[in-house]
Image (cartoon, rainbow, N blue to C red):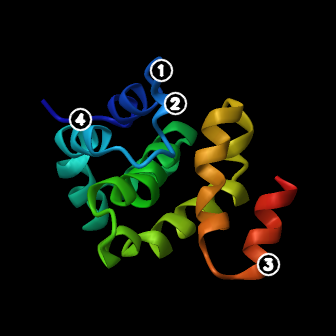
């Protein structure tokens, strides 16, 4: 079975997950690894670019490129290796207005690459959103 953007979002936004998103937790990192390592690799290789066409697909792709590597590779430079790709997906989604159809928690994750990048203009944009 081929995983979909909805599979990523069902895992990431499952009930109770919001308590785990920003904590350093080896057990959660292991869960993320089991559930999303393969998809992260596909996203990093550019194999999921068609997901950018929809709001939920773009969101799932950003999570795979921006948040997931922070769990997979905690304390390693690889945690940030796909940040630029995530930022590009976010900027395209904003240009197309895809963020407007997402719930607040979903938009937060779509916008995080703007906060994570080191460009002040992008960080300012994140604050205004």
* Foreground disc of the pair 2, 4: 2
Secondary structure beneath label 2: helix
Residue 106 percent across, percent down from the top left: 61, 37
Please state the total of marks drawn on the protein image: 4
The residue wearing badge 4 is 3
Give the percent coordinates (x, y) of residue 4: 31, 35
Q: Which mark is residue 16?
A: 1
Disc on the earlier residue, 3 or 2: 2
Q: What distance separates the C-alpha of mark 3 from that of mark 2? A: 30 Å
- In three-dimensional space, the C-alpha distance between marks 1 and 4, rounded to whole angstroms, equals 22 Å
Residue at (28, 63) in percent of width and height:
73
Q: Vertically, is 116 above or below 10?
A: below
Residue where numbered disc 2 is placed: 19
Closer to the chain start, of discs 4 and 3, is 4
| Mark pair 2, 4: CA separation | 25 Å
- The secondary element bearing badge 4 is classed as loop
Check contact, mark 2 vs mark 4: CB within 8 A: no
Quick one: label 1 or label 3, which is nearer the N terminus? 1
* Residue receiving disc 3: 121
Per the image, label 3 sits on a secondary structure element best described as helix
Q: Residue furthest bottom?
A: 119
What separation in Å lies between label 4 and label 3 (alpha carbons)?
Answer: 35 Å
């Amino acid at each position: 079975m081929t995983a979909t953007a909805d599979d990523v979002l069902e895992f990431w936004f499952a009930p109770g997950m919001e308590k785990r998103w920003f904590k350093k937790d080896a057990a959660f990192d292991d869960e993320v690894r089991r559930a999303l390592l393969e998809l992260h690799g596909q996203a990093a290789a550019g194999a999921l670019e068609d997901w950018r066409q929809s709001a939920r697909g773009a969101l799932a792709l950003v999570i795979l490129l921006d948040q997931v590597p922070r769990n997979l590779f905690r304390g390693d430079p690889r945690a940030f290796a796909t940040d630029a790709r995530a930022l590009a997906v976010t900027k395209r989604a904003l240009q197309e207005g895809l963020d407007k159809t997402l719930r607040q928690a979903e938009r937060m994750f779509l916008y995080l690459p703007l906060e994570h990048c080191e460009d002040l203009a992008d960080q300012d944009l994140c604050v205004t959103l």
